[in-house]
Amino acid sequence: MNGEEEFFDAVTGFDSDNSSGEFSEANQRVTGVIHVDTSKSNGIGKVGERPPQENGIQKHRTSLPAPMFTRSDFSVWSILKKCIGLELSKITMPIAFNEPLSFLQRITEYMEHVYLIHKASCQPQPLERMQSVAAFAVSAVASQWERTGKPFNPLLGETYELTREDLGFRFISEQVSHHPPISAFYSEGLHQDFLFHGSIYPKLKFWGKSVEAEPRGTITLELLKHNEAYTWTNPTCCVHNVIIGKLWIEQYGTVEIVNHRTGDKCVLHFKPCGLFGKELHKVEGYIQDKNKKKLFVIYGKWTECLWGLDPAAYESFKKRERRTDSLRKTKLDDCPEKADGDVVDAVPEAQETVQVIPGSKLLWRVNTRPPNSAQMYNFTSFTASLNELEAGMEEILAPTDCRLRPDIRGMENGNMDLASQEKERLEEKQREARRARAREEAEWQTRWFHRGSNPYTGTPDWLYVGGYFERDFSGCPDIY
């Protein structure tokens, strides 16, 4: 894949419509905790046209209608050099740098390994529950591996819903702010075992050769059976070689998962790749109780798997490993260091799989990607199903749902000219709507989420107000 492909917004869906708007957490009114909708409706309605499998579970597609559009003829530098001095948010990238998904759909990829939440809910001990929750938090970023296309920016008021009866959840998200882009989401177990919700608004930093997306916003998981709530924030994502060279992605930073009932905490360190790429994709951490006593050690790679074991066994293994490494140190010191003036950030060589320490137990392993993944933007099978518009769906979807966006649909079908034209039309329609609100001095009103404070951390958050699955869409905006 050509290294000049643009990925400023791969995590945020950040692009420009050349409109303006300001948002400050400090000046927003906090409305307090809002009751959520936990009705038992499956949210799908009567869609009898769906083809069932022999066991009665609905099929989902595993490939896209058209193969990925080649980006080899596009240069991000030819665009950026015309935009020197402009804000990153004011740079509009050609559609060739996109993938045929909205950022709201990319958020939904958190749910690919939802079985880990169900597993956590069934565990009798808090330590075992935290192990599964930690594995879920790591699995939520696994789909970003080798995903160098950027999702489409959600339009203000855009929504996405997904109900997977086979996986036991339903999900709803809404783009609640455009500048800065803020996406709010809410999911619940179909068997009333969990609630999963949050809002995401990353802060972008451009470092010349790389773009760093620092996550903002709290993610909350509630295990209803145990009356427990866990909160955390995702790691930082960095995309290297956005100007020239081969793109590659790393996640780094510390993720702290807090069990607000017991006081237990899981501290996970997503390692930066390091000088020789030895730490690429690695995750290491531990679970501690409220007295800071280490109870369990976790290690692995966010692209592959996660393991855990007793802290004493882990430390014993590490001591032996350090003795072995000290014997190699002389050889490593003789290696030439990387020059500061390198044109590109060298892509680390593929590292060996995770070395499993004797006595460890497997917490999570990534799903195998389909054989045609490289021809469909490196999507997983779960991701490939997200924009599928099944027979009868249009009658029950909100008119703001991502599946109804003509630019994304055009790109998915391989019609790049149509996709580009529709993208420009939708952005102009969004700008005109903003101008109209300015003339009328009217504020944008969100539909399914309201500003509030997180009930467990007290920090500003966007909370689901309920009612979406009752399917009264009469007041939805016309955004497409």
Image (tube, rainbow, N blue to C red):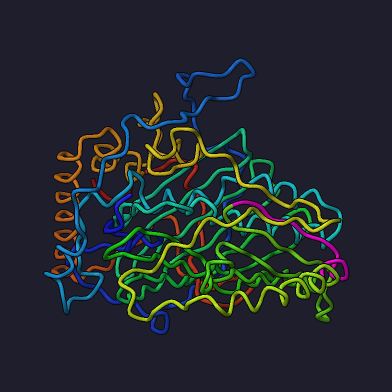
Image point (45%, 44%), residue name: 161
Can residue 223 be seen at all in this image of the molecule?
no
Query: Viewer-proximal residue, 97 or 53?
Result: 97
Lateral position of residue 229 relative to residue 160, left or right? right
Q: Nearer the viewer, residue 84 or 215?
A: 84
**Magenta stretch, residue numbers:** 304-314
The answer to if 305 sits in the magenta stretch is yes
Q: Is residue 365 left or right of residue 163?
A: right
Residue 480 in the image: x percent, y percent?
23, 45
Quarter where residue 16 is shown: bottom left
Residue sitting farthest toward the top: 54
Residue 176 occupies quadrant? bottom left
In this view, the residue in front, 86 or 302, is 302
Q: Is residue 399 magenta?
A: no
Q: Is residue 329 left or right of residue 155?
A: right
| 268 to the left or right of 247 | right
Residue 102 appears in the picture as rendered: yes
- Residue extending farthest to the bottom is 26
- State whether residue 225 is above or below residue 201: above
Q: Position of residue 304 (x, y in %)?
A: 61, 51
Give coordinates of residue 27: x percent, y percent: 38, 83
Residue 446 drawn at (x, y percent): 37, 60
